[in-house]
Image: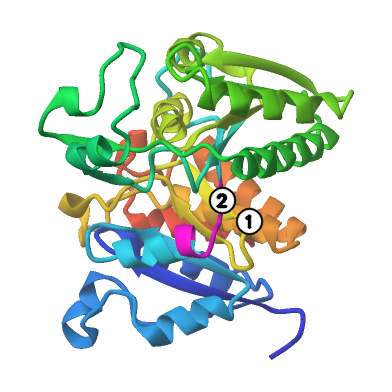
Amino acid sequence: MDKKRKKVVALGGDGIGPEVVDATCYVLEHAGFELEIVKPPNGEAVVEKYGTAFPEETRKLCDAADAVLFGASAVASQTTMIYLRWLSDNYVNIRPMKYYPGAVSCVKDPSGIDLVFLRENSEGLIPGREGDLSLLAQRLPEYRDPLGKSFADYGEGKFAVRIVSKRGCERMAKFACEFALQRKKKGRPGKVTFVHKWNAFPESDRLFERIVREEVAKHPELSYDNYLVDDMARRLLRYPKDFDVVVIDNMFGDILSDEASELVGGLGIAPSGNVGAKVPYFESIAGSAPKYAGKNVVNPTATILSAKLMLDYLGMHEEATALETAVAAVYREGKSLTYDQGGKASTTECAEAILKNLK
């Protein structure tokens, strides 16, 4: 293989995942980019044959790749996501929210919206670290919550633990500052916003906020602010153009980025990248949407823009810019948009239009 070529493993996963990944691979393969795209068995379609949605052969190919392009996860591909995200320690989830003229927004004037959520991907409340309350009552009999109650006082039930480690906060803060500095070089404000709920979590969220604030202070060219998560939910709708780089915990980030996607056209346009480990993976933030699977109607833009993030991460900046420019052209023209954007184009027709604008 040519040393310049990057190896990408494409995994469709479940539901609509195979369709949007196939559409994206069609664009990448026909664009002439220096990529070797491998498509090993995976997802719900192979469970009967292999006994798993993530065969060992596929895992090894992922480990040897430069990046993974992933479709969507329902129940079957949970093992795939667990491996790519948590076991591999891709601790940053990059979720850009950028408006392309022609997309359907929930606000009157979405032009100029261009913010990025940096969601802490490894701690917080996700993945769920849960169990029986009786276990906490046994192990921590002296503990009292802010109401003065012991775990035993709550009787039968379940608990969930929210993890906020010093190491996790520090690496997120460093990544966020480097990311904001790179965006500032491209004309963005160089502003870091931290989102928290420190009135409810005075120890964990104040730890996270302090570490982020102190890291930003090391970079005088960056500015900083912070908001309670409920206030941030409001501000995203009222003042979406005020934000640049948003650092946020796992669950808060999952929720607010979905909300913010409606500012720029919805989940069909919202991409993401999961980075930090040796092999990053890239996927849309949408779910598997099983009711639309096999109908060739879903919007492939989010996965195609996820591929744009992948190209940037792989150092293929010219190719990434060309792909984004082609997407923007299709939305500006408005002739090959899918149903969620008020159009009638199929998944493949939208992808074909993007490819046409690449050439």
Which residue is the site of mark 2? 91
Q: Can I make out residue 114 in this image?
A: no
Total tally of numbered discs in the picture? 2
**Residue 294 colored in magenta in the image:** no
Res 241 seen here: yes
| 173 displayed left or right of 63 | right
Q: Which of marks 2 and 1 is nearer the N terminus?
A: 2
Q: Are marks 2 and 1 in contact (CB under 8 Å)?
A: yes
Image x and y of residue 229, in percent: 47, 18
Which span of residues is magenta-colored? 85-92
**Which of 271/304 is in front?**
271
Q: Is residue 147 left or right of residue 257?
A: left
Quarter of the image where the N terminus is located: bottom right
User: On residue 95, which mark appears?
Assistant: none
- Percent of width and height locating residue 256: 43, 27
Residue drawn 65% across and 73% down?
Answer: 32
Q: Pinpoint residue 144: horizontal percent, then vertical percent.
A: 33, 21
Front-lying residue, 25 or 93 = 93
Residue visible at 46% across and 38% down in the picture: 250
Residue 231, x across and y down, in percent: 47, 10
State the mark number for residue 276.
Answer: 1
Q: Which amino acid does label 2 sit on?
A: Tyr
